[in-house]
Amino acid sequence: MLRTFGPRVLRSVTAAAGALLIAIGSAPVAAQSRPNESELLADFNHYVYIANLEMAEASARAILDRGLTPTQFLGVVEDSPTMQDRFERAYRRALAMPQLEDVASRLYRLYEDGRLARARDPNEVARNIALLTSGPRGRILGQQRLATAGEYAVPQLLEVLVSRRDQALETEVRALLTAMGRQAVNPMCAALAHVDGPTQETLARLLGRIGYRVAMPYLAQLAQSTTNDAVKQASASALSSMGASADAALSPLYLNLAEEYMGQSRSMLSFPGEPHQLLWEFRPGLGLQATAIVSEVYHEARAMDLAEKAVSLDGTNQEALSLWVAANFSRQFDQPAEYDNPAYPSATRRSASYYAAAAGPQVLERVLMRALASHDTRMAREAIAALSSTAGGTLFSSGGGRSLVEALSYPDRRVRYDAALAIGRAGPTQPFDGSDRVVPILAGVLRDAAKRFALVIADTPQRQQDIRTTLEAMGYTVLAPASRLSETSQTVAEVPGVDLLVSDLTASATADTIDQARRTARLQATPIYALSPSTALEELRSRFEGDPLSRVASQGVTPEQLTAGVEQLVDRASGPPVTEDEATSYANQALDLLHTLALKSGSAAGASYGVFDVGDAAAPLIAALDETTGEVRAKVATALSFIGQQRAQVALMDAAMNASGEDRAMLVEAVIGSAKRYGNLLQERHLRWIIEAAEGQDEAQAMLAASLMGALSLPNERLVPLIAGESRPK
């Protein structure tokens, strides 16, 4: 009895045979058996339905390997009347199968991109507009396709309204624009001030019906600038429906909209999940024009444009100017490397730091306050850098400087260091609330700048250890792991700051941990890399998408993936880690500033007559004296020589006694400087060593010791043996 096989089984058998023939050198036969894309897609649908995961995955990968464009794949899906429905149902089933989820999503994305590309093609838009008056079936099809095209269809739809050649088509277009809702708003707002009166009236009424508040500043500006009563009335009516007045001040309206874009909300994107968004403008002679911009910097481009409008309407609006500066910093952070931003062309625009410095301290204070409130570490550091180059002591005497003082308590240590340096360099002439925190922070730079501390929260000791091992390999000092964040409060309080938190918990515990960390002062700005069960990934990602300091990943990541994910998160959240060279630079800056502050303070025997008391740095400087070398150690010694405390002079002398060569000479010179300023604060053991050194065979050391004896103004009985020659070396 003969058994017959269907074409799909024959293809599978032939494919297997082809693979064998290839192995023995019969490639031409295999090439003849290669299925086309329609057959492969039919196979994918079939194998998904019968849950043959291996064959379904192989079919999908074979399609993807063909390198089809989205439009080409769309043609494959629409190759037969039933293929589209079968593919969509297979896709939904495949999403529930972990093995197929990735390849099925990639196929469906290709299909969706193909639909969008076709719908957005200008020729296709024109054909679909014509369908709006071609009968019931054509109208529905045209409406669906134009709605899919979204913003891309609006320029041609607007042309219908401007030309006023076909009243029936105008009616359909007005209804369609209203139904498109927010997809029609941005291009219509861009055109609103540039079209003729009747079209302005039509657009105003349409924007009122849509009710999307993005249109408010444009409608208000039109209402206040037009001399056409019908346009004024339509604009006022639209604003009233949105709860606004046609008489509202324009600059705050544009500023409020700029703030919404600055919030980086996904809801402000016209095309969420797509790599590009559209910027709209109306060009005389050309009409409504769109410029594509990468989604990473779309929010910033819109915020900056709207802030510019606000400033042009009110030059005294410092909030708008500070928002522009902040958005420009954000653009600089988020803009892809080598990208030529159409909204910020490199040929005509300078760096964000240039405009920040030009804006001045009052504006920069607002920028810094914004950064601190939103826990934007990178922006805070840029704002402080600009303040450091522009702010003087008068900033504090005039009641300013509050943002810099606030920054002294920021969770990220680099922000605290930058703020302390900026305040010290500004040279305030009067004490202010928080001035006593500057010197201890500067002193803390010497020991902690290059260290990175990480916290691990995981359910099991094994996962705690696995994560700890990975982080330690990355250079982090990992604090004692715990299973709950509440168990770490004491540990967190004992370190200068927590640079990273990694959790591996259940879904609910993950959410609670992130929420609790954001309510904890010392962890508010800490990047959090949360590992969660795959079943809860989408829910958690959606919940925390507005938190740029958090990232949720699958618990199944490898150590390599964890390393890469942590590096990306930390780099985006707070910038690259401090290198050894940067730590040395921080130390040198802090020591130079402490030296300068000591000279200004006029301190004597520990008393301070200036704004800052460098004596507050004594303990960390003494500790650093034993932990540093070379130029940094020399600067530590110099700083200590300006502190009129016995412990400072004693520490310098102890270090000198334990040193040798040039290092000892440098330290003795520091003791001499201290003795000149504050007199003899040494102990008897030190004096005995000094006299012995002065009597020794080493002429250079003897000369230093003799100089030190003179600086210390030792009693005569100590000097007589030397003067009388009784102890002159033989």
Image (tube, rainbow, N blue to C red):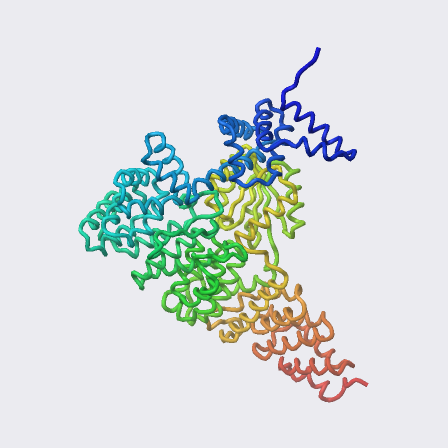
Q: What residue is shown at x 36% (from left), y 57% (from top)?
A: 307
- Compare residues 301 and 608 and report the one nearer the observer: 301
- Compare residues 385 and 174 and report the one nearer the observer: 174
Location of residue 565 in the rendering, given as x and y in whole percent from the top left corner? 59, 46
Q: What residue is shown at x 50% (from left), y 25% (from top)?
A: 82
Q: Is residue 483 above or below residue 572?
A: above
Residue extending furthest left?
Answer: 229
Image quadrant holding the C terminus, namely bottom right
Q: Is residue 524 at all visible to an observer of this figure?
A: yes
Location of residue 46 in the rendering, given as x and y in whole percent from the top left corner? 58, 24
Residue extending furthest bottom?
Answer: 724
Q: Is residue 159 above or below residue 598?
A: above
Name the image quarter holding residue 443. Answer: bottom right
- Compare residues 315 and 144 and report the one nearer the observer: 144
Q: Is residue 436 at all visible to an observer of this figure?
A: no
Location of residue 528 in the rendering, given as x and y in whole percent from the top left corner? 54, 46
Residue extending furthest top?
Answer: 1
Q: What residue is shown at x 59% (from left), y 56% (from top)?
A: 577
Image quadrant holding the N terminus, namely top right
Answer with left or right where residue 219 lies relative to residue 398. left
Answer with left or right where residue 15 lies relative to residue 513. right
